[in-house]
Image: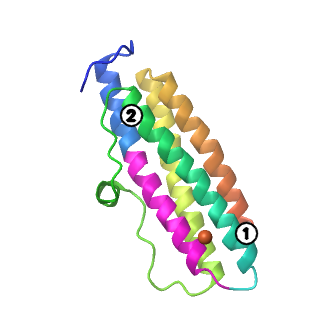
């Protein structure tokens, strides 16, 4: 990796870059899944969900940019192509047969929850290795993903 003026040890930067690139890939995948639902959703709550999903995609897109730029801050190469996102993302593929709005909400909530869980682990890992800046970014992302999950999930709350 190229040397930067950042005083973090290179070994810490390398580990953080790995964490960041993994979540960069997943965030690109997540945005695509949210837009897929935004485009294909149908049903009585169409307009609200269609509009909300576009807002969620914007939030995710902002994180994609922050993850990629944090990689560069630490001297790494941001792996931001669709091809690398496809091969690195840990999200489940979007099911092909989704034909009503409740199923789209279920799938998107699953993707947001999976992404959030991994981000929570990444925040803890970054703090553990001594990269407070990366940990802070992951915590910020986590808080926002939790909120998006609440906003989308409120359309189809889990049954007790
Ligand atoms: Fe649109």
Quadrant (top left/top right/bottom left/bottom right) for the N terminus: top left
Q: Residue at x 60, y 72 (%)?
A: 38
Residue 21 in view here: yes
Q: Residue at x 59, y 79 (%)?
A: 103
Numbered circles on residues, count: 2
Instruction: Rate crowding at label 1 as few (under 14), some (14 to 19) or many (20 or more) other CA atoms within 10 Å.
Output: few
Which of the 4 image quadrants contains residue 150? bottom right
Residue 53: x percent and y percent?
Answer: 64, 66
Q: In the rendered structure, are the residues bearing label 1 and label 2 in contact, judged by CB atoms less than 8 Å apart?
A: no
Between 105 and 70, the one nearer to me in the picture? 70
Residue 123 shown left or right of residue 41 in the figure = left
Residue 43 shown left or right of residue 104 in the figure = right
Residue placed under numbered mark 2 in the picture:
71
Q: Is mark 1 within 8 Å of ligand 1?
A: no
Instruction: Rate crowding at label 2 as few (under 14), some (14 to 19) or many (20 or more) other CA atoms within 10 Å.
Output: many
Q: Which mark is residue 157?
A: 1
Residue 95: x percent and y percent?
Answer: 45, 78
Between 23 and 63, the one nearer to me in the picture? 63
Residue 40 shown left or right of residue 26 in the figure = right
| Secondary element type, mark 1 | loop
Residue 120: x percent and y percent?
Answer: 53, 42
């Amino acid at each position: 990796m190229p040397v930067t003026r950042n005083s973090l040890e290179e070994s810490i930067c390398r580990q953080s870059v790995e964490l960041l690139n993994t979540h960069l890939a997943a965030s690109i995948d997540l945005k695509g899944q949210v837009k897929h639902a935004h485009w294909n959703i149908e049903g009585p709550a169409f307009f609200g969900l269609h509009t909300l999903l576009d807002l969620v995609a914007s939030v995710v897109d902002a994180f994609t940019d922050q993850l990629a730029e944090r990689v560069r801050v630490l001297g790494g190469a941001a792996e931001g192509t669709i091809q690398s996102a496809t091969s690195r993302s840990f999200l489940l593929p979007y099911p092909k047969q989704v034909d009503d709005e409740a199923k789209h909400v279920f799938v998107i909530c699953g993707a947001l929850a999976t992404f959030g869980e991994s981000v929570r682990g990444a925040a803890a890992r970054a703090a553990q290795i001594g990269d407070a800046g990366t940990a802070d970014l992951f915590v910020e992302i986590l808080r926002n993903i939790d909120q998006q999950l609440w906003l989308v999930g409120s359309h189809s709350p889990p049954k007790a």
